[in-house]
Amino acid sequence: MTLWGIADAEQLAALTRLLDEYSKEIGIAGDKAARDRLAARIMGLFNEGITKPEEIRRNLDSSPDGWLVERIAS
């Protein structure tokens, strides 16, 4: 069983694959800042209880792109 907000090794590997694949798909694989924001968004969804990569992907696909550009002014 996974504790709240803690990914086991299998989940972490799946989340990393999702990050890599999604970064390439949306064209940000070479943009460290954008990739870091995507990673934070993925982990945020995971911490909200959305733990399956396909569910996270659906949420990313259906969410506004605001998460991608948030904190640019920071």
Image: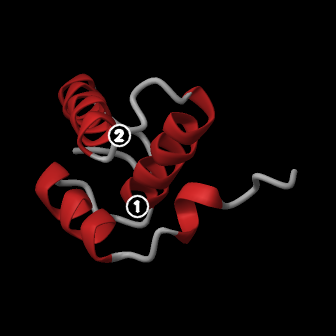
Question: At label 1, which amino acid type do we have?
Answer: Leu
User: Is residue 25 visible from the viewing direction of this image?
Assistant: yes
SS at mark 2? loop
**Residue under label 2:** 27
Q: How is the image coloured?
A: secondary structure
Q: Quadrant of residue 48?
A: bottom left
Indicate the quadrant containing the N terminus: top left, top right, bottom left or bottom right: top left
Say whether residue 63 is left or right of residue 33: left
- The numbered mark at residue 60 is none
Depth order, front residue of 67/8 = 67
For the residues bearing labels 2 and 1, Cβ distance under 8 angstroms: no
Please say if 20 is above or below 2.
Answer: above
* Image spot of residue 14 (x, y percent): 19, 33
SS at mark 1? helix
Please say if 29 is above or below 38.
Answer: above
Question: At label 2, which amino acid type do we have?
Answer: Gly
Q: Which of marks 2 and 1 is in front?
A: 2
Outermost residue on the front side: it is: 27
* Image spot of residue 25 (x, y percent): 23, 42
Depth order, front residue of 48/68 = 68
**Residue under label 1:** 45
Depth order, front residue of 54/3 = 54
